Image (cartoon, rainbow, N blue to C red):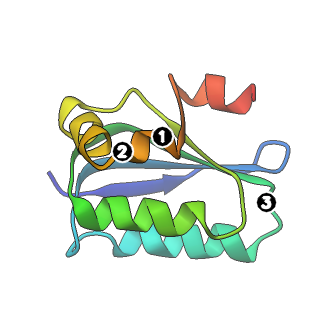
């Protein structure tokens, strides 16, 4: 499935970026562009809706880690698909991300 990245209008300083499909090193550019725009704008928090991601490899994980260290709070809105959850578990990165059950829960933080 081709990846898609959708950026919602900011809500109270929070930018929601929704990702769907398969993400690997060849398909990350739309996400990178959306993140760059969010970092250039005065948003307080970035919420990445990952609930519709069907596949993510280490390239996607690396991009998420880079985003986490970019100086803005990052919240992942799930649920994570089983493959992505396993990737996070195997690399212990589930310990460094704030992962909540959906965009509404992320906005409530």
Expressed as whole percent of the image width and height from the top left, the position of residue 5 reads 41, 57
Q: Is residue 37 left or right of residue 59?
A: right
Expressed as whole percent of the image width and height from the top left, the position of residue 44 reads 81, 55
Neighbor class of circle 1 (other Cα within 10 Å; few <14, some 14-19, many 20+) is few
As drawn, the label of residue 43 is: 3
The kind of secondary structure element at disc 1 is helix
Q: Is residue 48 left or right of residue 63?
A: right
Q: How many discs mark residues in the rendered view?
A: 3
Q: Are marks 1 and 3 in contact (CB under 8 Å)?
A: no
Q: Camera-side residue: 75 or 15?
A: 75
Q: How far apart are marks 1 and 3 (CA)?
A: 24 Å
Mark 1 or mark 3, which has the lower sequence index?
3
Q: Are marks 1 and 2 in contact (CB under 8 Å)?
A: yes
Neighbor class of circle 3 (other Cα within 10 Å; few <14, some 14-19, many 20+) is some
On screen, 79 above or below 50?
above
Identify the residue at horizontal 20%, vertical 75% (top origin).
Answer: 26
């Amino acid at each position: 499935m081709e990846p898609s990245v959708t950026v919602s209008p900011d809500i109270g300083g929070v930018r929601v970026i929704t990702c769907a499909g398969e993400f690997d090193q060849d398909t990350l550019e739309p996400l990178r562009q959306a993140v760059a725009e969010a970092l250039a704008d005065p948003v307080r928090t970035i919420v990445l809706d990952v609930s519709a991601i069907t596949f993510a490899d280490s390239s996607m994980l690396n991009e998420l880690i880079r985003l986490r260290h970019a100086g803005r709070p990052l919240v992942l809105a799930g649920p994570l698909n089983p493959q992505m959850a396993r990737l996070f578990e195997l690399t212990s990165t589930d310990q460094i991300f704030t992962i909540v059950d959906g965009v509404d829960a992320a906005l409530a933080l």
